Image (cartoon, coloured by chain):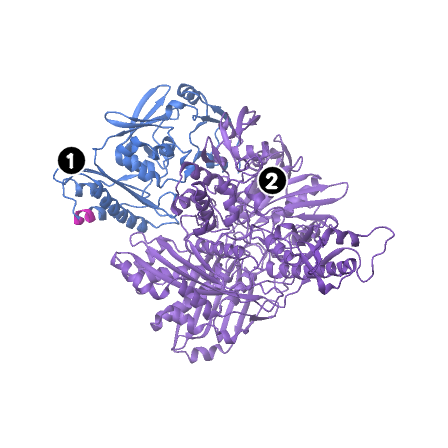
Amino acid sequence: MKPPPFRYHACSSLSQALDLLSSLDNAKLLAGGQSLMPMLNMRFVFPDHLLDINPIADLAFIRDEPEAMRIGALTRQHAIEVSDTVAQRHPILQEALAHVGHIQTRNRGTIGGSLCHLDPAAELPAVVTAIGGEIEVASARGRRTIPMAEFPAFYMTPAIEPDEIVVAIRLPHWAPGHGYAFEEFARRHGDFAVVSASVLVELAADNTVRRIAIVLAGIGTAPIRAAAAEQVLLGQAPTPEVVSRAASLCRDFEAKADPYASAAYRQHLAGALTERALRRALQRARPAGG
Amino acid sequence: MDDRHGISVTVNGRTYRREISGRTTLADFLRHELRLTGTHIGCEHGVCGACTVLLDGDSVRSCLMLAAQADGRQVETVEGLAAADGSLSPLQAAFIKHRGLQCGFCTPGMLMTLTELLRKQAAVTEHDVRLAVSGNLCRCTGYQTIVDAALDAAAAARGNDRSADAPSAGTASPRIEDRPLVLGQGCFVDDIDQAATLEVAFVRSPQAHARIVAIDAAEARSLPGVVAVFTLADLMEVLTDGQLPIQYPDPKLAQDLGSFVLAKDEVVYVGEPVALVVAESRYVAEDAAARVVVELDTLPAVTGCETCLSVPPPPVRTGRASNVVSDIRQSYGDIERAFASAHGTFSISLQQHRGCPHSIEPRGLIADYDKRSRRLTVWNSTQLAHELRVALMRMLGMDENEVRVITPDVGGGFGGKYCIYSDEVAVAAAAVKLGRAVKWIEDRREHFVAAVQERDQHWDLDVAYAADGRLLGVRGTLIHEQGAYILQGVNIAYNSATAFPGPYVLPAYDLRIVAATTNKVPTASVRGAGYPQGTFAMERCLDRIADMLGLDRVEVRRRNLIAADQIPYATPMKSRSGAAIVYDSGDFHAILDAALGAIDHAGFPARQAAARENGRLLGIGVACGIKGTGRGPYESGIVRIGPSGKISVYSGAAAMGQGIKTALAQICAEHFGVRPDEVTVVTGDTGAVPLGMGGFASRQTVTAGSSVHIAASRVREKVLKIASRLLEADEADLELVGGKVKIKGVPSDGLALHQIARVVHGSPGYSIPKDIGPGLESSEMFLPDGLTYGMGCHAVEVEVDPATLAPRLVRYVVVNDSGRLIDPASVEGQLVGGAVHAIGNALFEWMGFDDNAQPITTTLAEYLLPTATEVPRIKVLMPEYPTPLNPLGVKGVGESALLPAAPAIISAIESALKVPGLEIRAIPLSPSQLFALTRAVHPG
């Protein structure tokens, strides 16, 4: 299992990478390589050119900005896992990252790579969807921002053009004291989830739910926002009954089946994991002004 | 494509400048460009972790990085862990002390991952360690001793010696195998640096069943770097036959069921080798293999055999009369009377699946043919060096002097290396044809489609039982899926059938045993070789009897176990050779009681009730099994002391990580009063050992151990005889201490072994007394009278998540009789590793095929091996019931723990759920399947 022939290019700057990407035929970007390299070794992909963007130092950063936290696309998953800024602004990322692969893959794997790979059960796309993140992409033609909700185009395919590179992920702040929880069921620790549930919640001063995001992964081809369940909770005091009712709505999505898990089991998990995630997130949430 | 890059990489403090191809992985760069072969390659898709190195201090998988990406970076590998003077790092030392390795193949990756953990985190818990190595697969140890080693090393680094309260004994003397393995100085087959070796990639069938219309290799042959592309027709020039014989001849089997060296005119499973590319590198060989065009005409594929008796399927291979290749009975007692007199009867159907071997080192060989001397030398990662020599002689028309098979370090076997394979013969034939050294290393994807598996068995049983829960009789049918060819024989199904009664009294038994072929990878032994399935079937029957009678499941076992005073117990069954199956020693009730005590079975109802109060589902399961071990007919043992005074042991045994070299050294060393590490052990080399059988069936300590024991005692006798003449003392007054013969009670330096060896080595003109004869050597072939049986009992406590239905094993006890223990730590290692293998079989490992017999689990991300986070700490008790059948009193243990594990776990899951009517009848059991079962009996 050896990679097929290609021409390797070490890109030292974003502009160099963008130029090569727009000028070369059948070029592929190499970020952390934790998904692309196995696919190369297994000869599932045959690029003529491999553009290694790892040397582009200014694509790896974690910045706390007034409205949002921004993470450079090339930031290693492990760096996010141990970042104080992330712990303060979006701790759900760290809770999810504890389920992502293993230390060797998190040392190398990047947030941008994981989002572009878009495995339907992957943790990071689910959490970024829940946060309401935005994907900043660049090309030789300029820059644009894509809401994460619109980022998955098809199964494991991001909505970016062949000449575009994801450069950063913008994660708008949730209120300080917001509740969060990430729950997943995987067959073994570190495996892609069978199903995961990501929950973010803000409570109003009267302890009613004023903002909520529930995202399921592993059900369909991309993360799903459970809008109906969110509606049950919005504006309500999140009593156990309300939480259960909301969670039970998460069983209603049409779920995929594979040899590892039936559709019915996935639907069951969606409800059970959402209920757990909601309970834990609500435990953590502090009411506004509280 | 010319894509060269000059890079400068600092590895273990030394800077290397090289020009490399852009697609060279870091793992291949380290191993093949820098010849730092301590970093191992186990999967090449980033799952097994064997290739873990540190990049600027952070652990990374070197198969998932290009060497070009390491330009200007600092890399640390296992070779850099020890100090310059060779002193081991605390972690390396702890691995040796705690037996944190068996075959040693995963060890470099484990060491690098844990080195990072211990550098970055001063205080670590067991959970931290298990999380850290959850991305490193080990098939041997069950992870427990690795965890112990890491905890010990962490404590030592903090300055407090934790070894006193370390979880496992950790006091065993070091294995003679271990020091090179923790230093990255092991020598596995891909580590051998044979000059100008060519590399092979196979073209394998993409279809399960098809007629070969044409093979066009023109484009592949024209690729620069390609030396040759061979089809079967090309290799027939050096082969005597295109089809392999069945490994162990069985007159009852049709003889045309052996596999082809390369496919002839038809392919009958996905993965069957069709052509072979020889090139200057594996990279180029794979480029060329992809360009060989094989035109196929699809034929119907047989995907299963469950209904082969009622609905005749199309033939697996054109011209075969039937897909049923064996249809026999295991039958004794009055089965009709058993059912007529029964208090109750029931029928039960069981679907059992066992997966693939998955040694972390895949298979592989180097074949080197020297045209001038007409000698073929083969280094093969095999459990069967001597058998391979026989096969190569036959297939290549050579004799014993022309073929030598050498077994280097073997990175685990588990049955996968206990076969003579087409691809091995093809590589050897290519070497002969080219007159070159040719290497083929099986990659992980090939292991899924080209190494043997056990796969499916279908059991349909009727059970008759008495009012008190005793078994009266069992009858039914076992259908065993054989795969497309027969490599060894149909022994798996037979083993399953004879394992079924287990340690219980079964008065009447009538099982039809059918082996049927399908268009899938051939099956043969995977660790346990059919015994686990027979055990699972019996234990499920006993659980069912208990449930039907409202009795405790353990009590039903107690009532059926063979009593201590019935042993030796002659079962009414015969082995395949016709010998009686006799349980030779043991106390089965005592072993059951020991397991119950160790898991506090009496306290379980209270624990379960308390857990239920908190919404937690706790269950317990207990199961027994008995394994026939020490299969004959013999294993060789040669003990020799040359003029250097070095004591050497030679055996046809196969060392594959289980520690057989240490055991043989220990057995030999006792006779000379020396330490085991003063004895050199050579195994699996047909050039050094004339006769041998190899490593399988939990046999080697019994067979090779006994031979070495007898040989060592003969050499010792001779040493004392010579010494008595030289020292002019009576033999009875001599003692052998520290490798020297002394007169008891007389202070002196004594006579060293090299002095004695020198005397009988001979000098021209000086005679050697005829009653002594030249040389210090004895060659023995101990012939066991039959298998020796070791009984085991596993007790397991499981917690099932009420929401996800995922089981978590929380307490696990293994009690196993392995007879007299030679090296208790090795035996414990086999039992823990075996239990974890069986946890995989019960809950995780599933080799899937679709409706066209296409394999759908061909990566280690799809086929789930147990990882450190998924397995419990396992408590092991090893009561010793020495067997009278061999001079050491030893029993085998390599497969024993595979038997009771799955039924105990499944029983515990049922116990946890307490859902009326829920019966688990198939393994492996996924949470999704358990969900479906609970919904079926309890909708909504």
The residue that disc 2 covers is: B191
**Residue at horizontal 33%, vertical 36%?**
A124
Q: Is residue A4 above or below residue B819?
A: above
Q: In the structure shown, which secondary structural element does the residue marked by tag 1 occupy?
A: loop
> Residue B197 location in percent, x, y?
65, 37
**Residue at horizontal 77%, vertical 55%?**
B775
Q: Is residue B699 above or below residue B215?
A: below
Given the current orientation, which residue lies at the most extreme right position?
A: B765
Q: Which mark is residue B318?
A: none
> Residue B87 location in percent, x, y?
56, 39
- The magenta-colored residue range is A240-245
**What is the letter of the blue chain?**
A
Q: Colour of chain B?
A: purple
The residue that disc 1 covers is: A288
- Near mark 1 (Cα within 10 A), the count class, few <14, some 14-19 or many ≥20, is some
In three-dimensional space, the C-alpha distance between marks 1 and 2, rounded to whole angstroms, equals: 64 Å
Amino acid bearing label 2: Asp
